[in-house]
Image (cartoon, helix red, strand yellow):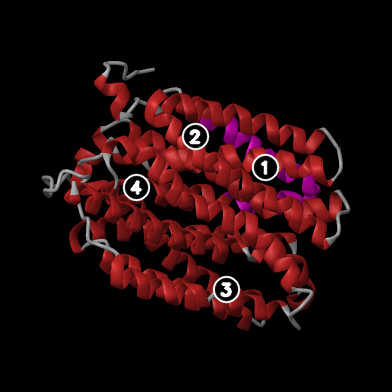
Amino acid sequence: MTASISERAREWRAVALLSAGFGLVGVDRFIILPLFPAMRASLGLTYQDLGTLASAFSLAWGAAALITGYVSDRLGRRRTLIPAVVAFSLLAGCSGLAQGVVSLLLIRVLMGLAEGAYTPVSIAATMESSAVSRRGFNLGVQQDLYAILGLGVAPILATQLLGVLPSWRGVFALVSLPGLLLAWLMHRGLAETRGTLQTGQPAPRGGMRMILAHRNIPLNMIGMCCMLAVLLTVTTMAPPYLTDARHLSQSQMGFVMSGMGWGGFLGQLVLPGISDRVGRKPIVLLCYGATLLALLALLFAGGGPIAQFIFLFAIGGFTNSMICLNVGPLTCEAAPASSTATASGLVVGAGEMIGGLTPGLAGAIAQRHGIEAAFGVAIAGLVVGGLVATQLHETAPSRARRGLATVA
């Protein structure tokens, strides 16, 4: 009984620390978006610049994910996670020192490398720290703070701090501090879990050919590109859409944009846990369809700030949930146990490096054809991604044990 309690305590401590880290990743990544209107006036930025910054950040994130997932499978999780947290926290503060688009671009690229290093390793560590029956739920919890802090709290915090601090630069300085404390807590309390997946013993190594042999891995790489085309296009273009096309004030925009974070929080708290019982694939397909309906409603249903909050709430909930399942259980459960971070890194890296180009494309479309036209990129991602998801293999252990794994 004591051993069981101790194992459960270690599991929840790991999930809590890894979740806090991913929450700070979300804040540092997305807080620039609600600050963009204020930064635009100070630095002379355009829609195209905003898209370029988002795309460059994603490319750096993807490149780091491809490399560090493989490295951590060999060197360990802690040796990758803790330095990554320190690096992206310091670089977040440095964003406030930018004097123009070039310096801001350089800082964001370096921060993307650090956050990309954290992402697949944290996913693998969460899966490895979790009991089999709680993998989907725990990963949803671990991913939850990314949504609630990055997309829920950050827009409100940023727009409110702008009314208190003398400049947007001070906002970046403040958000860098919690990460340094978290790195110290991880050093004290995060156990090494490399390649165990709750078996207690390291598994045989899987080479790249073995990782890619399962059809879910290449399909998830394509799916991640489509999912990020949705998430990054909406999060990047929605703030100027709400202020320029919907004529909301800065504070109203911050409130409405927070809907994506609150939706992501609730969605990831519920849907990945449900997938532990009904399967991963049905939930992913549900998410694609529901996100498409919510996005069309945002663009064409009209309504005031409350209605737009609800539409973004739905987009955030379903999009973040399907990303969570894609990079987590659908990938890690299909990969060799010793190579879960490598597999997750492949999926995250492909998604960020290819899907990460879409904000730049959306920004160019917005500059030439109007801000509303930019969301066509997200709609295309939903249609293509939904078709790809129909070909996934089911990986939920509960479904496999009952002989209900599907091959669509």
Q: Would you say residue 259 sits in the magenta stretch?
A: no
Q: CA distance from mark 1 to mark 2?
A: 14 Å
Mark drawn on residue 271: 2
* Disc 2 from disc 3: Cα separation: 29 Å
Q: Which residues are magenta?
A: 358-385
User: Which of the marked residues, 4 or 1, is nearer the chain's N terminus?
Assistant: 1
Task: Check disc 2 and give the amino acid type.
Answer: Leu
Q: Mark 2 to mark 4: distance in Å?
A: 20 Å
Tag in front: 2 or 4: 2
**Closer to the camera: disc 4 or disc 3?**
3
Nearer-N-terminus badge (4/3): 3
Does 373 lie within the magenta span? yes
> What whole-number distance in Å separates the C-alpha atoms at marks 4 and 1?
27 Å
Q: Which residue is mark 3?
A: 175
Q: Helix, strand or loop at disc 2?
A: helix
Q: Which residue is mark 1?
A: 313
Looking at the rendered structure, the kind of residue marked 1 is Phe
Of 98 and 84, nearer the camera is: 84
Q: Secondary structure at mark 1?
A: helix
Of the two numbered discs 4 and 1 in the rendering, the one whose residue sits closer to the viewer: 1
- Give the crowd class for mark 2: few <14, some 14-19, many >=20 residues within 10 Å: many
Q: Is residue 233 visible?
A: no
- Tell me the residue at 30%/56% (across/down): 69
Q: Amino acid at mark 3?
A: Val
**x and y percentages locating residue 284 in the rendered image:** 48, 30
Q: Residue at x 22, y 61 (%)?
A: 192
Please state, as top left, top right, bottom left or bottom right, where the C terminus lies in the image. Answer: top left
Using residue 349 as the reference point, say whether residue 39 is left or right of it.
right
